């Protein structure tokens, strides 16, 4: 991968809505409390969550203007909204959150097991692996690209990755409701499991000798998992060792830099263009 060159963004707690200390500890340990709530905000994120039958919808706070814009989705979801004064919006969000007058308290999504979501068959399979990508805005953008290019799932470790939050959902612009985002206890085990299912795991590294097209020559129709490393640090040593191959995104000039979400989009296009 062309390694991203930027500093780490705001933390999930700073930008996603409120997470309790207990929720944060559980998230670090890979546990998801049954009653944990996610505060989703923004018209697109809230509309798509309301339209998702898999979402446990608990509380909807909207301004009158937002209620009018979301009227169809609210009626279909069968939830009674709380109409709020836009000057005193009561949802427990960070003051900097651009909520557009809409916030939904909901339960986190359960996408099931990777083996189920990533099962081969039904056409060429593609999976995205994220190795400690923690910025919710990058992960949200990656979910959008994964949906566009038909990835079976985006898989990340439960620890040291962006949890499901309002900031991630807003960056995903609705893709969080449709694109499986699986956080597993051990990424190395997930890689081995995918390899046992026939996946060729390709790690993106700026120093790799081959391009994506060269690394996948003769494998265009087989299942492929793209592994992308953390912002700045790249793939961890163990992840790199487990990959079946490494590839780079070649810049046009002597030097080039993409952040991880842009690199994911380019890599997914390169992978799927010839299929």
Image (cartoon, grey):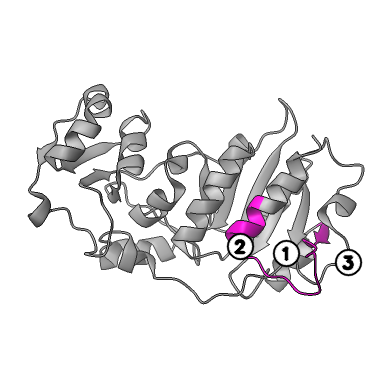
Q: If the image is split into quadrants, where does the C terminus sit?
A: top right
CB of mark 1 within 8 Å of CB of mark 3?
Answer: no
Q: Which residue carries the number 2 mark?
A: 260
Q: Callout 3: helix, strand or loop?
A: loop
Mark 1: few/some/many CA within 10 Å (<14, 14-19, 20+): many
Q: Indicate which disc, 2 or 1, sits on the residue closer to the N terminus.
A: 1
Q: Which residues are magenta?
A: 244-265
Q: In this view of the protein, can residue 55 be seen by the observer?
A: no
Label 3: few (<14), some (14–19) or many (≥20) C-alpha neighbours in 10 Å: few
- In screen coordinates, is 194 left or right of 184? right
In percent of width and height, residue 168 lies at: 41, 54
Residue 246 drawn in magenta: yes
State the CA–CA distance, disc 3 to disc 2. Answer: 19 Å
Q: Are marks 3 and 2 in contact (CB under 8 Å)?
A: no
Q: Earlier in the sequence, mark 1 or mark 3?
A: 1
CB within 8 Å, label 2 to label 1: yes
Task: Please provide percent x and percent y for residue 148.
Answer: 59, 39
Give the side of residue 112 with respect to residue 96, left or right.
right
């Amino acid at each position: 991968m062309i390694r991203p060159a930027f500093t780490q963004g705001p933390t999930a707690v700073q930008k996603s809505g409120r997470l309790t200390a207990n929720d944060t500890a559980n998230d670090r340990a890979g546990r998801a409390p049954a009653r944990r709530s996610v505060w989703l905000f923004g018209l697109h994120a809230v509309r798509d969550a309301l339209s998702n039958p898999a979402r446990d919808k608990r509380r909807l706070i909207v301004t009158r203007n937002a209620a009018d814009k979301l009227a169809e989705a609210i009626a279909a979801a069968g939830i009674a909204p709380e109409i709020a004064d836009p000057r005193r919006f009561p949802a427990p969000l960070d003051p900097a959150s651009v909520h557009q007058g809409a916030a939904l308290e909901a339960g986190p999504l359960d996408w099931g097991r990777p083996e189920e979501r990533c099962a081969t068959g039904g056409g060429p399979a593609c999976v995205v692996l994220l190795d400690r990508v923690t910025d919710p805005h990058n992960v949200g953008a990656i979910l959008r690209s994964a949906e566009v290019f038909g990835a079976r799932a985006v898989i990340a470790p439960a620890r040291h990755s962006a949890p499901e939050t309002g900031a991630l959902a807003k960056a995903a612009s609705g893709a969080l409701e449709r694109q499986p985002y699986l956080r597993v206890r051990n990424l190395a085990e997930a890689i081995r499991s995918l390899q046992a299912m026939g996946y060729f795991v390709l790690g993106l590294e700026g120093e790799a000798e081959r391009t994506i097209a060269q690394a996948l020559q003769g494998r265009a129709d087989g299942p492929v998992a793209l592994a992308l490393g953390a912002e700045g640090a790249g793939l961890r040593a163990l992840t790199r060792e487990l990959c079946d191959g490494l590839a780079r995104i070649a810049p046009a000039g002597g030097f080039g830099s993409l952040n991880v979400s842009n690199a994911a989009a380019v890599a997914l296009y390169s992978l799927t263009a010839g299929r």
